[in-house]
């Protein structure tokens, strides 16, 4: 699959810099979690990596500049699930998730049995099978979010960018989603970069965390190194205790 390198990436809007000189490398099959307080620039950084906002610096996939790839090859390389998606009108859940297979089809080709199997599997894992024939417009907020993520997962891109993927999901659906992403990472070598507000989930699933504040990288490293009470106090203005789950991953407990 694909490794990703970000070199001195800066991005913003209408002349205002939001993210400044970010550099990082994610090996093929790795999972980088981007964390930081509200307004830190997490979503902007993810959009810049995806090529959706103007930026300086460079993004390379397996040593190749992302901007040099043709549109179809780029769609097979990068999958992106936004935090606030714009959904098409009139599609069923199945039709929408099938759009994730489009980069893998020829110009006039229809979905194969293998494509349909991928979609069916993703729908089942995202607890959407019972909603497969429903129109997107009839779904609740959490259901729509799961459909958006299902489309990105069905794309089977080498690099998967997820912007706050657990927003609107209850804890069970959030864990099911992150478990599936982790399986794709381990089994297919998918490289994952995600932003997450939930620091416990971030520390339990991502291999490394990049802490962003005011558009700049504060630290990057293993979850135990990035998630300390001192750092959370400094950058989140939060009073916390860092506990350990049975497998040793961090659990962030607020202190009243």
Image (cartoon, helix red, strand yellow):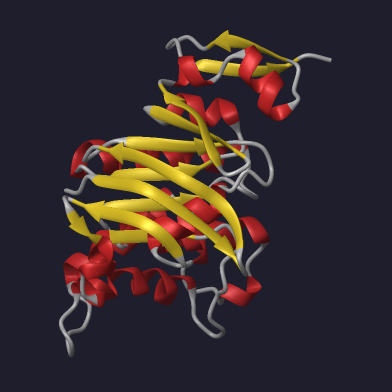
- Is 108 rendered above or below residue 117? below
Location of residue 113 (image quadrant): bottom left
Q: Is residue 175 visible?
A: no
Farthest-out residue, bottom: 108
Residue 135: image location, x then y, percent:
56, 77
Question: What is the tally of numbered marks visible in this picture?
Answer: 0
The quarter in which the C terminus is drawn is top right
Residue lying at the far front in this picture: please name it: 15
- Residue 70 x, y percent position in the rendering: 21, 75
Q: Is residue 120 left or right of residue 12?
A: left
- Is 26 placed above or below 221 here? below
- The image quadrant of residue 171 is top right
Q: Residue at x 28, y 75 (%)?
A: 102
Q: Position of residue 239 (x, y in %)?
A: 76, 17
| Any part of residue 218 in sight | yes
Residue 129: % across, % down? 45, 60
- Horizontally, is 27 left or right of 219 in the view? left
Q: Is residue 4 left or right of residue 214?
A: left
Q: At 75% from the left edge and 22% from the top edge, which residue is drawn?
A: 238
Residue 8's place in the image compared with 50, above or below, is above
- Residue located at (62% from left, 48% from top): 167
Q: Identify the residue at horizontal 52%, vertical 16% (top origin).
A: 250
**In front: 105, or 69?**
69
């Amino acid at each position: 699959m694909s490794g990703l390198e970000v070199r001195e990436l800066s991005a913003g809007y209408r002349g205002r810099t939001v993210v400044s000189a970010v550099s990082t490398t994610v090996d093929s099959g790795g999972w980088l979690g981007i964390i930081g307080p509200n307004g830190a620039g997490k979503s902007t950084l993810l959009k810049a990596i995806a090529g959706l906002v103007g930026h300086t610096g460079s993004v390379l996939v397996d040593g190749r500049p992302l901007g040099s790839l043709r549109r179809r090859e780029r769609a097979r390389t990068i999958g992106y699930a936004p935090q606030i998606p714009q959904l098409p009108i009139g599609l069923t859940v199945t039709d929408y998730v099938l759009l994730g297979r489009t980069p893998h089809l020829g110009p006039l080709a229809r979905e194969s049995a293998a494509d349909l199997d991928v979609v069916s599997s993703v729908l089942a894992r995202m607890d959407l099978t019972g909603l497969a024939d429903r129109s997107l417009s009839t779904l609740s907020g959490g259901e729509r979010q799961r459909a958006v993520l299902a489309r990105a997962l069905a794309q089977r891109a080498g690099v998967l960018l997820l912007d706050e993927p657990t927003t609107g999901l209850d804890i069970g659906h959030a864990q099911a989603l992150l478990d599936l992403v982790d399986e794709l990472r381990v089994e297919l070598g998918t490289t994952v970069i995600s932003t997450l507000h939930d620091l416990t989930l971030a520390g339990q699933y991502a291999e490394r965390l990049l802490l962003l504040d005011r558009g700049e990288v504060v630290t990057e490293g293993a979850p135990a190194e990035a998630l300390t009470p001192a750092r959370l106090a400094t950058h989140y203005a939060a009073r916390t205790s860092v506990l350990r789950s049975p497998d040793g991953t961090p659990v962030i407990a607020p202190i009243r």
